[in-house]
Image (cartoon, rainbow, N blue to C red):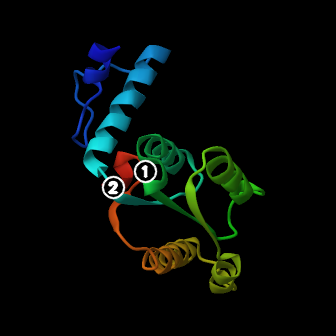
Amino acid sequence: MSGLKEKYMVTGDVRPDDMPRIETKEQAEAFIEAQVELAKKQIGDGNVLLALSGGVDSSVVAALLIKAVGQQLICIHVNHGLMRKGESEQVIEVFREQLKANLIYVDAVDRFLDKLKGVDDPETKRKIIGAQFIEVFDEEATRLADVKFLGQGTIYPDIL
């Protein structure tokens, strides 16, 4: 599998045209192995901070980083009260209990709902939610020492 793994060793932000599409279990395993190896090399003995929403993007990044650096990954999960029923409990069960992640759970339901009370405009709601999330995440992050990296679980178009 070594030769296949090298095809997935990409350090840039854009998938190269010559990178094979993942269509088999072997290719998926090679991709995971390559990404874990890249993360280990980049992170070394540093700590990584990641906002873990429980969505696909942040969950995949968290799982890869747990495999790569274990307890050096610090995940922050903010319960803002706007998720599906039981979603925060599922994040805690999967990441803290099953994967043994270093997970900080923040119950900010009242804080978010108080800020949204009486707001009808969807765009205004979106801005309030975004601002509150940044504030809560920043408050938690400033309590941590020795964090050298910020993990990001999003798709590339979100960055643009």
Q: Is residue 78 above or below residue 75?
A: below
Q: Residue at x 68, y 60 (%)?
A: 83
As drawn, is 121 to the left or to the right of 38? right
Q: Secondary structure at mark 1?
A: loop
> Which residue is the extreme one toward the right?
85
Q: Residue at x 77, y 56 (%)?
A: 86
Circle 1 residue? 154
Q: Is residue 3 left or right of residue 129?
A: left
**Residue assigned mark 2:** 159
Relative to 156, say whether 3 is above or below: above
The reply to whether callout 1 and callout 2 are in contact (CB within 8 Å) is yes
Disc 2 on helix, strand or loop? helix
Closer to the camera, 93 or 128? 93
In the figure, is residue 73 to the left or right of 160? right
Q: Residue furthest front?
A: 45
Residue at (32, 35) in percent of width and height: 37
